[in-house]
Every structure is written in C-alpha cells, then in structure tokens.
Amino acid sequence: MDQRNAADFDLFVIGGGVNGCGIARDASGRGLRVGLAEQGDLAQATSSASTKLFHGGLRYLEYYEFRLVREALIERETLLVAMPHISWPLRFVLPHHDGLRPAWLLRLGLFLYDHLGGRKILPPARSLDLHEDPAGAPLKPGYGKAFEYSDCWVEDARLVVLLARDAARRGAEILPRTKCLAARRDEGLWRIRLREAGGAEREVTSRALVNAGGPWVGRIIAETLAIESSERVRLVRGSHIVTRRLFEHDRAYIFQGADDRIVFAIPFETDFTLIGTTDRDHEGAPGEAVCTPEEADYLRAAASEYFRAPVAAEDVVWTYSGVRPLYDDGAKSATAATREYVLSLDAPGDAPPLLNVFGGKITTHRRLAEAAMAKLAPRFPQAGGAWTARVPLPGGDFRHDEPGRLIGALLTAYPFLDPRWARRLVRAYGTEAREILGEARNAEDLGRRFGHDLTEAEVVWLMEREWARSAADVLWRRSKLGLRLDAGEAAALDAWMEERTAGAPAPRHGPVTETV
C-alpha cells in the first residue's frame, strides 16, 4: 500500500502557538495534509504573552546578532502588508540618558536599524528635542534629547488564531484542547495518541511530526516521545504590567535601564499603557508563570526613572507573564541568551522525521515556518514551494494604509456604531467585520450585549470561526475586552457560552462556511 495513502496526515504539529500554527499554515498551502493539536486554547501560553511587537530587536545589535536582526527587520514590512488589521506602524521614542549608552552609539545603532532590513514603508529614525516635542511632556525635565524610530505593533493572539484559520481553510485539521499523550515511530509512520477535552482518545498517523510545543518542547521530547536528546531549552520569563494611560500621544517609549536592560512603555487599548518586559530564568511549570510582585516593582521603577509622575502600584490594572523557550546556548544571563531559532531534525535512516523547534520570535514566525519546510522538503517532493510572503491573513485583504477608510465605511454602513466600536472591529477583523454585523440595522439586531460593545453576534462568530469556548478565550486572547468587563459580566459570558456549547452539535475542527 502507498504509504502516503496509509497515513492520516503528511505532517502533524504538536503545539498551537505562533510557530506551530505558522508551520501548519505554510504546509497546508503547499498541498500537504496537516493536523495540529494544542493542549489548551490557541495562543494560550507564550504567544499571547508577548510585548506585541513586530520588531528587529534594537538591543540585539549589542550582542552582534546581525542575521537575526536583519531577518526580523525585513519581516516587519512583509507581515505588515499581510495583516494590516492586526498590525500597524508604531513610532518609538528613545530618550538619551546621561551615563548610559552614549548618543553616538545610539545614533549608530539606529542607522544600522534603518538600513539592515531594506525598509520601504516605515519612516526612518530622527532626532528629537524633548523640550519642544510633545513626547517630552510626560518625561522628567532632565531628558532633553531623544531619538525616534519605527517598528510595528501586532495583536499576538489574534495573529495565531488567523494563522490557524488560514491553515484550516486550506485543509488543515486544527484540534485545540487536544493533548498529545504519546507518539512513536512504527512501520515508517508516526502513531500519535490524542485525548480531547471530553476525555475521548483516538490515534492518528502521520508521515512526519513537528514538535512546536514552545516551553514544553523539552518535556515533549523526553516524555511524550520518549527520545533521548542532548539539546536543551532555556525557559525565560517575560512579565508585563498594564497601567492606566500614562501619556496622551500615540507614540511608544523605549527606556534604558542602569542594568543594561530596556523597557517599553506602549499605548495599549486606547485607555491604557503596556510596560514590559523582564528577563528572568523560569523555574517550574511553564503554565504557572505569573508576574511576581518583584517584577512589577522593577517595571514600575524602570518607567518611573523617566516619567515625570511616578508609576504607582494603584496605577496597575493587569499583569501577565509568558515563558520564552530559548535554545540553551550557555549564555550567562537570560538577557544575553540567543533569540535565534534552532530547528533540530531527527530522521535516522528511513525513519519518519521529527522536527523539534527551539526558540524564535513572533516577528520571525513566517521565516521559521519556511525554514522548517525546507528541512522537511526531501520527504515531500510533491509539496509546493514557499508561498506565504505578503499573502493576506483572513480579513487582511486591504492596503496597510487603509484602516481609516474601512472604519469610515463601516460607520456609514452601520450608523448605530460609534467610532471606537467601529475601530475595534476593524482592528480585530478587518474586512470580515461586515460579516459579523451582517444585516443589522441597530445594535439590538446583534443580540445580547455582554458588556462594553461585545455582542452575541461577535461571540457566535468567535465560537464558530475561531474555536473560542470560554470567556477567557474571548476576553483575553481573541480580544482584550477583559480590561472592560467586570467579573460578573465575564461570568455571565462564560455561562452563556457553556450553555450554547452544550446545546450545539459536535464542534467542527475547522472554521465553518469558508472556502479557499
């Protein structure tokens, strides 16, 4: 029997973060039969706990990681074109701090940053006089000079969900809340045992296996696959705090610390400021990462060194933390550990291949997926070539400079929306916002309102198209409306979703009513 026909999948991916979903999307678009299992919700761990930037990593230049920075800089604009609804340009203000990095060094770094990646869309760096520029108003008067440069914002968890949706509409089977219990090689195939959220188990077969388990990558190798490996992952915790809005303009800050680290202060969800991140080696289970009081104090102190008004504990409205699965290169500190991704192929003889994914940045997820497919290409001569560059994700089929036009058109078509509501819908769903609103003539046509501007129509969309099953899925990953709804409203949403799920037919493994 033809081995291809004997297997359920050509490629099976363990892990529903940005790298796993990126690989699934790439492989599906090349014509391979792809399955993906994620033990929790999509983007439930590291991929929803980032600083939410597509950036080259300015500070990595100090560690001479020029290849990584160049690749990331090139990717910023490639990704911006493909997802203009969930990613947009952001200007960063870097105040010069006497006694830290000299101005000439900052200027040199920004010159390299502007020219390493073939920048075309984003504006170049420039100098600022903080005594005259509005960016200086929130800062202490001792800061007079600054530099301003470009990077991009990205809605990280929505990125992951859209990658999964694009993979599904190209034929992939996406299985959130499905744990991979074991996988073993047998007669030229991988036999993979899965357990769904309800407890049902099944076995599938695949010609190749990708371990994109993020912080769990090492545990999957040792326990799930029972394979000995000398490669190690270094777990580094990055924590963030979200405060009330600390400044009025729409630019972000990048602050230098006396410990050589940098901290960002970024406009967040209109009424808030995001401050992060830390770099601490993480002990314990990856899923138990939290922003410790010490880390929150560190971030408040780092920002207070620059802001005219100190950031107080009562200013903090939310904290979050994620664990980065870095390749253990033996660096002395978590800050110095490489952000380069490492793809380790285990394919002895004619055995079905295993690809382990270590490290990576959200900015380089697409290039990582291409590199992964290049490693696996010899086993799949029927597969197509690289295709993902600048190909829009669902809802992203418009120009990067057109969100304002889409928002205006939505307000015209649905006069009951207010500008903030319309902007949120476009920034989350792009051109698909109209599908959520449908034929509604007023807000009541959208069904129950769960709090703020979250309606039944939107929640149904998220359940049917984006695998949402709980209030946390909706409020903290598909959106950040958890900052708006109170505990009672979140509990009511949870109960409504649970009731709807219980009365619904067995969930589909991919989005409904979608075609390529």
Image (cartoon, rainbow, N blue to C red):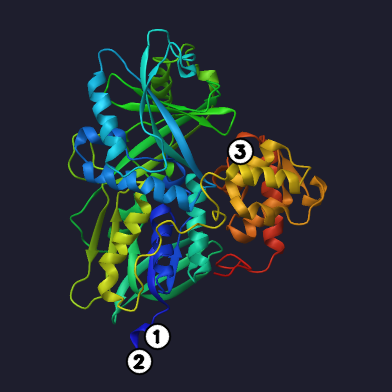
Quarter of the image for the C terminus: give it: bottom right
- Residue position marked by numbered label 3 in the rendering: 482
Q: Nearer the viewer, residue 31 or 297?
A: 31
Q: Are marks 2 and 1 in contact (CB under 8 Å)?
A: yes
Which is nearer the N-term, disc 3 or disc 1? 1
User: Residue at image x 49%, y 60%?
Assistant: 164
- Residue position marked by numbered label 1 in the rendering: 5
User: Residue at image x 42%, y 42%?
Assistant: 121
Marks 3 and 2 sit apart, C-alpha to C-alpha, by 52 Å
Marks 3 and 1 sit apart, C-alpha to C-alpha, by 46 Å
Give the side of residue 337 with respect to residue 151, left or right.
Answer: left
- What amino acid type should be assigned to the residue bearing mark 3? Gly
* Residue 450 x/y as whole percent: 73, 43
Residue count near mark 2 (Cα–Cα under 10 Å), binned few <14, some 14–19, many ≥20:
few
- What amino acid type should be assigned to the residue bearing mark 1? Asn
**Residue 483 in view here:** yes
